[in-house]
Amino acid sequence: MARILITSAIPYINGIKHLGNLVGSQLPADLFARYKRARGDEVLFLCATDEHGTPAELAAAKAGKPVADYCAEMWAVQDALGRGFRLSFDHFGRSSSPQNHRLTQHFAGRLAEAGLIREVAEKQVYSNADGRFLPDRYIEGTCPNCGYDKARGDQCENCTKQLDPTDLINPRSAISGSTDLEVRETKHLYLRQSAMRDQLRAWIDSKTDWPILTTSIARKWLDDGDGLQDRGITRDLDWGIPVKKGDQDWPGMEGKVFYVWFDAPIEYIACAAEWVEAGKGPGSEKGWERWWRTDKGAEDVRYVQFMGKDNVPFHTLSFPSTILGSGEPWKLVDYIKSFNYLNYDGGQFSTSQGRGVFMDQALEILPADYWRWWLLSHVPETSDTEFTWEAFQQDVNKDLADVLGNFVSRITKFCRSKFGETVPEGGSYGPQEAALIADLDTRLRRYEAHMDAIEIRKAAAELRAIWVAGNEYLQSAGPWTVFKEDPVRAAAITRLALNLIPFYAGLSAPFIPDAARTMAEAMGTNPTWPDSAETALAALKPGQAFTVPEVLFAKIDDATREDWAARFAGVRG
């Protein structure tokens, strides 16, 4: 049994996430976690809300609430939506937790002792209208690289280029919109990433199995221009983790907090401590360390991260700088699965602009499995993917309703009408059944290989092909026709086809867990991963009772599709 640590990029607390956020990290991570659990591995799947920094303060101010109250409320909302989409986190934590405060301050102290933090007197934008320094995300303007007019002071979300606020063209305050800005001097702490450059390069070069998307972004940041730059890790904000050197005050840093991108990845580790202290993990208070410290049992852990491409630089360079620079035996990531963007109907999904379908809206109109299947089968692995309502309707109707749902409905109803609601006995399997079993065994191994390699689109295509194979067998064998002349032979065909239902349930559970449970329960089983097609297709014995399930997936008609397209054409209010 392998031990697999899985983390999904932690979403900002500022509002409900859209489907692009979901498919860019949390949903693929859940697919992998469910698969690995089904194969018998020990899995710890962690995620949390990213609660510090400008997004939280701005969103709280807009909502007219104290930032701590706003974050608590939005954590509950995001937690509920995650459960609605059946995200199987072992723990969904909060970066504002006491555990993350302690760990972030601990890492800062270790880095200072190692000589990897320097104090910098720098010029920073001050807003006279707002009476405060404006950290990166409080400033908006035009990106000097691509011309996007809503770039933020830390990064352009359009071209992903890392920016400083002073790089922006026509900058303005994100709080008041004021352009009455001036540059003043302030002091901040910088992580000396440049000193870690050679060590980071050697580490990244050793990851020969990583996706090209991941390594190309990391190498670009290492080598473009003057190479990897030192990165500020403090900000002039009220809300955040107070700057301390371990448990000691940091002279000159009074009133400052750690930058959100310094503390947010550390929450992955803190989240495991939260998990244990919440009573979900091992009994020992330090039980989480067996997942995170190689001197406490984590040497045999495989750590896999999932994220959108805009998060790659911080997870390949900044967070590893923190881990390696601490000089302590923390677990480094083994594999980073990164994704391109899901675009919405000719444009971009955008939380800040309220464009696209958001998680709460999606669940209002359809159950989670519809969305899980479409998003995962179209996950933007090698290039950006476009969501259109026409493609969504077509694939739901074809894959889920016509192929999988129709198969389950057709064979269970046929059996009920001819043999009753029990698995029929009599007859034996012939060459047609042997060929199907052999084909499914081959496809099962191929499906497992794609899932192990986290090749999600290929895995979805193979699962779809497995569903299709059962349909083609049923159509070719035609038990409804055979029954008229040879009911014994029809019983054997029906028995094999009924056995396909729990087989499908086990294989489909990582993608569509609710439908998988419905299929398995209808046949009196639980969704389990099959050892082989041969054994799985003999699991239901003659005489076993079953029920005819309700329609697994309803088709989406044209009028409904058109209504949804019109409803979501504008921006979220």
Image: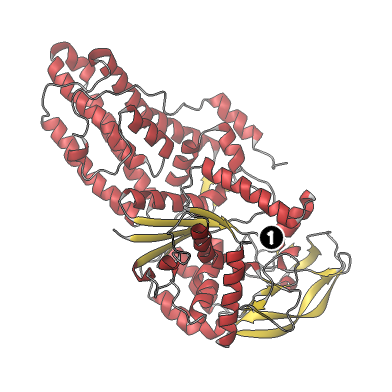
Can you say which quadrant of the picture contains the N terminus?
bottom left
Relative to residue 306, is residue 406 drawn left or right? left
Between 440 and 536, the one lying in front of the other is: 536
| Quadrant in the rendering for residue 186 | bottom right
In the picture of the structure, the residue carrying the numbered disc 1 is 148
Vertical order, 8 against 325 (above or below): above
Can you say which quadrant of the picture contains the C terminus?
top right
Between 387 and 248, the one lying in front of the other is: 248
The image shows residue 219 at horizontal and vertical percentages of 49, 74
The structure residue drawn at horizontal position 16% and vertical position 32%, both measured from the top left corner, is 433
The structure residue drawn at horizontal position 29% and vertical position 39%, both measured from the top left corner, is 466
Relative to residue 512, is residue 435 drawn left or right? left
| Quadrant in the rendering for residue 189 | bottom right
- SS of the residue under disc 1: loop
The image shows residue 223 at horizontal and vertical percentages of 52, 79
The amino acid sitting under disc 1 is: Tyr
